[in-house]
Image (cartoon, rainbow, N blue to C red):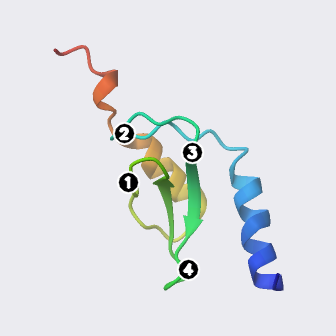
Amino acid sequence: MSETEGGCWRERARLQTQTIKSCPFCGEEERIYPYISETYPSRHFVGCVNCRARGPETCDSKEAIRMWNYAPRNYDSNCE
């Protein structure tokens, strides 16, 4: 494992201590992870492994998590 890859995994482990809400599309609660774009390493996003939904790309992981958590969840609504 290269030093860069190790840095990415350490960053992911650190970020997982932040609360990441469930997927706003499918409701998955367990397999939601912060990612760093492979194409543009300065771009960060949160993604759902279950339905492959992705949050908006941002310049830092904390902001990506904030944006993911801000998305409305259809199961949060009292409307039927």
Tell me the amino acid under the disc marked 1: Ala
**Dot 4 corresponds to which residue?**
42
Residue 65 relative to residue 4: left or right: left
Check disc 4 and give the amino acid type: Ser
Marks 1/3: CA–CA distance:
11 Å
Give the SS element for disc 2.
Answer: loop
Instruction: Tell me the SS state at disc 3.
Output: loop
Q: Position of residue 46 (x, y in %)?
A: 50, 56
Amino acid marked by disc 3: Arg
Residue picked out by circle 3 = 31
The disc, 1 or 2, on the residue closer to the chain's N-terminal end is: 2
The N terminus, quarter of image: bottom right
Mark 2: which amino acid? Answer: Pro
Looking at the rendered structure, the secondary structure element under dot 1 is loop
Q: Position of residue 45 (x, y in %)?
A: 49, 63
- Of the two numbered discs 3 and 4 on the same chain, state the one appearing first in sequence: 3
Residue occupied by mark 1? 53
Q: Earlier in the sequence, mark 1 or mark 4?
A: 4
Q: Earlier in the sequence, mark 1 or mark 3?
A: 3
Decide which of tag 4 and tag 2 comes sooner along the chain.
Answer: 2
Residue 55 in the image, given as x and y percentages of width and height:
40, 56
Q: How many residues crowd mark 1 within 10 Å: few (<14), some (14–19), many (20+)?
A: some
User: Residue at coordinates 32% horizontally, 24% vertically from top-left?
Assistant: 75
How many marks do you count on the picture? 4
Real-space Cα separation, disc 1 to disc 2, in angstroms: 9 Å
Q: Are marks 1 and 2 in contact (CB under 8 Å)?
A: yes
| Near-viewer residue (26 or 37) | 26
Q: Which residue is mark 2?
A: 24
Q: Earlier in the sequence, mark 2 or mark 3?
A: 2
Q: Position of residue 34 (x, y in %)?
A: 58, 57
Labels 3 & 4 near each other (Cβ < 8 A): no
